[in-house]
Image: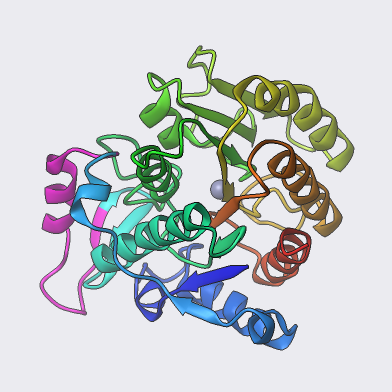
């Protein structure tokens, strides 16, 4: 397993009281060290994504918009939308978060490893073709999927998104690209309340009512995602790994526990073994109770590294 991160991801600043803090990643990296995972799998420095990689998912005008959001100095933060902010290092952090996924995809395709985890921020799955929103500037997982499809050996990719929020950005980018299956489980109704009604063969929405527990989540994933994966037969599986459906998370009301993240990871591993020689890349999306986030990431990586 390869784990990517980068110090600049800790330098993407947000206003006081904002849930998507640098401490999220700081605590996760500290926890990976304490539980021995980063001794076994030393953290690799993620490169920045190339412009040509980002331009497969977003137009040049979006890159220019992000660049224009970089404030003049470290005392300033630029609001991008009511939830999304940029400091002096945020653009670079977003480029590295996407670059981690691109580098990890290359590792999978070249056979250097079968499992990749990107411990990065800002998250990406809310970023639409033309919109930074919901803490996200660039859609890292989409950039990685499109980079994979640009390689000769990859014809179909699946993106599995178990963040508690709907992956509206990923849906927006792939709604007219049948080479990419997007499956998203999410609390509904809930933020971002857009894109959940996009009706395409390659887009699978799995809404869950507030208060749903692991048994509901597991049954819905088996009902919705399994037949879709069997139809799609992906050459590569990418995962938007958000851990904010955890019962202790302050941003939503789904009641998953660590064992549910173990279960869904094993489900993904089983499907990857069946369809794509076990090749899986997961990238960090949400997760805002820091203790629950650390325990959930550990459960995810323990099951992923098998
Ligand atoms: Zn989320």
Location of the C terminus by quadrant is bottom right
Location of the N terminus by quadrant is bottom right
Residue shown at the point (68%, 65%) measured from the top left: 297
Report the side of 203 relative to 207 (left or right): left
Residue 253 lies, with reference to residue 5, above or below; the image says above
Q: Position of residue 113 (x, y in %)?
A: 58, 63
Report the side of 117 relative to 123 (left or right): right
- Name the residue nearer the viewer: 108 or 153: 153
Q: Position of residue 92 (x, y in %)?
A: 26, 67
Write down the quadrant of residue 2 in the picture.
bottom right
Magenta segment range? Answer: 57-79
- Name the residue nearer the viewer: 263 or 198: 263
- Looking at the picture, the colour scheme in use is rainbow
Looking at the image, the residue that sits furthest to the right is: 215
Residue 127 appears in the rendering: yes
Residue 255 appears in the rendering: no
Residue shown at the point (60%, 33%) measured from the top left: 184
- Name the residue nearer the viewer: 7 or 41: 41
Q: Tell me, yes or no, whether the highlighted magenta stretch contains residue 64.
A: yes
Q: Position of residue 44 (x, y in %)?
A: 48, 77
Q: Position of residue 168 (x, y in %)?
A: 46, 32
Q: Tell me, yes or no, whether the highlighted magenta stretch contains residue 66.
A: yes
Number of numbered discs overlaid on the protein picture: 0
Residue shown at the point (39%, 37%) measured from the top left: 149
Residue 168 lies, with reference to residue 303, above or below; the image says above
Report the side of 96 relative to 302 (left or right): left
């Amino acid at each position: 397993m390869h784990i990517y991160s980068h110090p600049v991801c800790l330098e993407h600043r947000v206003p006081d009281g904002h849930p998507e803090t640098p401490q999220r990643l700081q605590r996760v990296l500290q926890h990976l060290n304490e539980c021995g995972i980063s001794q076994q799998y030393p953290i690799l420095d993620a490169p920045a994504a190339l412009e040509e990689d980002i331009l497969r998912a977003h137009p040049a005008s979006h890159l220019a918009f992000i660049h224009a959001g970089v404030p003049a100095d470290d005392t300033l933060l630029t609001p991008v939308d009511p939830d999304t902010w940029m400091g002096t290092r945020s653009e670079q952090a977003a480029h590295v978060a996407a670059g981690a996924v691109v580098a990890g995809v290359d590792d999978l395709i070249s056979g250097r490893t079968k499992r990749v985890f990107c411990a990065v921020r800002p998250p990406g799955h809310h970023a639409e073709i033309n919109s930074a929103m919901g803490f996200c500037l660039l859609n890292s997982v989409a950039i990685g999927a499109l980079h994979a499809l640009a390689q000769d050996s990859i014809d179909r990719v699946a993106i599995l998104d178990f963040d508690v929020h709907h992956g509206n950005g990923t849906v927006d980018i792939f709604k007219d690209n049948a080479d990419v299956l997007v499956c998203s489980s999410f609390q509904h109704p809930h933020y971002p309340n857009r894109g959940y009604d996009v009706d395409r063969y390659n887009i699978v929405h799995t809404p869950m009512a507030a208060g749903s527990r692991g048994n509901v989540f597991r049954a819905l994933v088996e009902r919705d995602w399994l037949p879709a994966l069997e139809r799609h037969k992906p050459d590569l599986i990418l995962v938007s790994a958000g851990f904010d459906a955890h019962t202790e998370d302050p941003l939503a009301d789904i009641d998953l526990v660590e064992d549910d993240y173990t279960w869904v990871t094993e489900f993904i591993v089983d499907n990857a073994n069946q369809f794509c020689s076990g090749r899986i890349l997961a990238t960090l999306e949400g997760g805002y109770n820091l203790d629950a986030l650390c325990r959930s990431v550990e459960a995810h990586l323990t099951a992923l590294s098998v």
